[in-house]
Image (cartoon, rainbow, N blue to C red):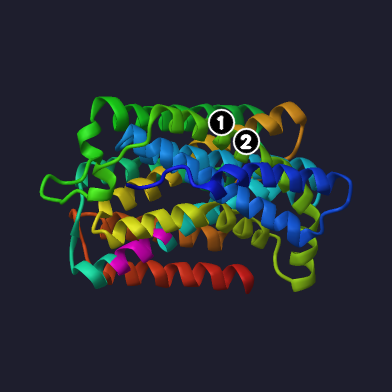
Amino acid sequence: MRKHLSSWASWGPLAAWLVFAMATIGAAPTVVVSFGVALAVICAVHHAEIIAHKLGEPFGTLVLALAVTMIEVGLILALMTASADGAASLARDTVFAAVMIILNGIIGVCLLIGGLFHREQSFQQSGVSAALATICALTVLSLVLPNFTVSEPGPVYSNEQLAFVAIVSLVLYLTFVTVQTVRHREYFLPPASETQDCEDALDPPSNRTTAISAVLLLAALGAVVLLAKELSKPLDDLVLSMGAPQAVVGVMIAVLVLLPESVAAVRAALRDRIQTSLNLALGSALATIGLTIPAVAALSLFAGLPIALGLGSKGIVLLGLTLLVTTLSLGNGRTTVLQGAVHLVIFGVYLFTTIVP
């Protein structure tokens, strides 16, 4: 029988809060604070997975995606308020990095591993197509359109435009969640021919374990947000010492937040459950844009912080290529190793051109 509430996951959030307490009095070096953030992130995703197992698909992947996005939003807002340099473009860089990591990195690894171990994997085309259509609309409205509006100079929206796009993004995301969980839930379930993993079918967590995990999840998320402020200056200093562009900070944040979810998606692909992998990846991409953009827009409007959402020409090209390739590679309900290799090549190009623009 699987043990759901591991001991390390129980004391992990408490340890992260202890690290924060030490950091506030200057008794925790940067490496300790980094460990505290990583521990809190891993614990948060672990407890989200417990809740997800209790709720079942597709609610499970939705909970995990929301938990990861709450971490990302907390990190972005904390760093935007703590850092003046690069704060205007931090949200754009992080959201773009998350989209590229998810659509090219995570999906690429899952398709490659799935193809190597299972030759071909199948999924529900209707659900994936719905998610990709929503992702295309959200990314273009949030990251491309600001470059072509004329109310404000530069890659920014006016206050009215920013508020409108934030509302539209939230409406699109909530509509997708309604379709995923209520109206057409069957679109996001594994194909009928796919064998269910016995580990997931047996031994669901008890109500008590689920309730404890919910409390610990909130504690872990709070620790991540608070510890992020302590890491803001060391992150900026590290990027400056490397001589790398400011966009690298956004990549670091996205990698940190998405690493545990990446592991969950890859494990599902290894078990020949590519539907779960795609639900995790695409759901996280949707939540990243649909929730992060409204959150940073609200902070910009109410706190008066500048925010630049429009990508440069290089970013627009890579984003367009990613959306096109993802739509084609997931366009027939079956995947092979070739699609995974193509996505990983695009991801490698994105990382290289970010560091060496």
Is 354 rendered above or below residue 37?
A: below
Q: Are the residues tagged 2 and 1 within 8 Å (C-beta)?
A: yes
The residue labelled by disc 1 is 215
Percent x, y for residue 229? 76, 46
Q: Amino acid at mark 1?
A: Val
Of the pair 109 and 294, the residue shown nearer to us: 109
The residue labelled by disc 2 is 219
Mark 1: give few (<14), some (14-19) or many (20+) Cα within 10 Å: few
SS assignment at label 1: helix
> Which residue is farthest left?
193
Which mark, by number, is residue 91? none
Percent x, y for residue 206? 38, 31
Spatial separation of the CA atoms under disc 2 and disc 1: 6 Å
Of the pair 9 and 101, the residue shown nearer to us: 9
**Residue at x 41%, y 59% (from the top left corner):** 106
Magenta stretch encompasses residue 110: yes
Judge left or right: residue 211 versus residue 26. left
Percent x, y for residue 44? 54, 43
Query: Which residues, given as a range, are shown in magenta?
Result: 106-113
SS assignment at label 2: helix
